[in-house]
């Protein structure tokens, strides 16, 4: 089981490396996957996946260390992609923020749902962690797609429709309600522990 879990985590890291680099590429360029691959996107993605794997074995949660990922993505943008300096900075930071927020939200939600400690979700080999990882990756894909549509508004074909805006606002409202619910549970739990 340990070999399968390690292989699964490495595949997730490879996915994340490609997702981060492709997001940076797509934000700065209008080409497709073939253009991404021709811009050395594969090399940068695999190198970033290696860096992610390294940090996953050194730390439980990358939080501060994700700045190194941002520097790496900025390097990719600077050396291989077109765009203004601030656009390149932005394209390196946004995917990481989306990933960190998604990961923190899903991890905390799953600790409450499964009634297990956060440390178990982040470190143990269990079905709860597997589900958390998969849901986080799906949420990341969704937020990447939506944010690219919003941020690349200068192209008419990427403009959001009324239905898409409605879905985004609905998800935002639901997220606020869930976050408030999680905070209330956390506060209630801490009050009970003090008594």
Image (cartoon, rainbow, N blue to C red):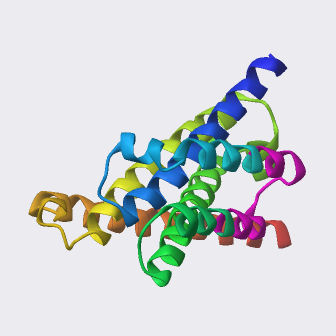
- Marks counted in the figure total 0
For the C terminus, the image quarter is bottom right
> Is 3 left, or right, of 103 in this rendering?
right
Rendering coords of residue 79 (x, y %): 57, 65
Rendering coords of residue 164 (x, y %): 18, 58
Query: In this rendering, is residue 12 above or below 71?
Result: above
> Is 134 left, or right, of 153 in this rendering?
right
> Is 74 left, or right, of 69 in this rendering?
left
61 or 188, nearer to the observer: 61
Residue 59 appears in the rendering: yes
Is residue 139 covered in magenta? no
Query: In this rendering, is residue 121 above or below 77?
Result: above
Looking at the image, the residue that sits furthest to the top is: 1
Rendering coords of residue 6 (x, y %): 78, 27
Is residue 64 covered in magenta? yes
Our reading of the magenta stretch's main secondary structure is: helix
Q: Please identify the quarter of the rendering in which residue 157 is found.
A: bottom left
Residue shown at the point (54%, 47%) measured from the top left = 40
Residue shown at the point (56%, 58%) measured from the top left = 99
> Is 78 left, or right, of 63 in this rendering?
left
- Magenta residues, as a range? 53-70
For the N terminus, the image quarter is top right
Looking at the image, the residue that sits furthest to the bottom is: 86
Q: Please identify the quarter of the rendering in which residue 171 is found.
A: bottom left
Rendering coords of residue 115 (x, y %): 69, 45
184 or 117, nearer to the observer: 117
Residue 195 appears in the rendering: no
140 or 90, nearer to the observer: 90
């Amino acid at each position: 089981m340990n070999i399968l879990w390690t292989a699964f985590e490495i595949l997730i890291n490879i996915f994340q490396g490609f997702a981060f680099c492709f997001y940076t590429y797509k934000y700065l360029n209008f080409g497709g996957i073939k253009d991404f691959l021709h811009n050395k996107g594969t090399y940068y993605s695999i190198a970033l996946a290696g860096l992610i794997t390294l940090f996953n074995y050194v730390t439980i949660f990358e939080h501060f260390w994700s700045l190194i990922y941002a520097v790496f993505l900025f390097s990719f943008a600077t050396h291989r992609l077109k765009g203004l300096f601030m656009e390149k900075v932005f394209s390196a930071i946004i995917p990481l923020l989306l990933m960190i927020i998604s990961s923190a939200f899903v991890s905390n939600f799953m600790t409450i749902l499964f009634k297990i400690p956060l440390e178990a979700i982040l470190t143990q080999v269990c079905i709860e962690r597997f589900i958390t990882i998969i849901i986080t990756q799906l949420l990341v894909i969704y937020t990447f797609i939506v944010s690219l549509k919003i941020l690349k508004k200068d192209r008419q074909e990427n403009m959001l429709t009324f239905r898409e805006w409605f879905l985004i606002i609905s998800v935002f409202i639901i997220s606020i309600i869930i976050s408030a619910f999680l905070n209330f549970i956390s506060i209630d739990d801490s009050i009970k522990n003090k008594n």
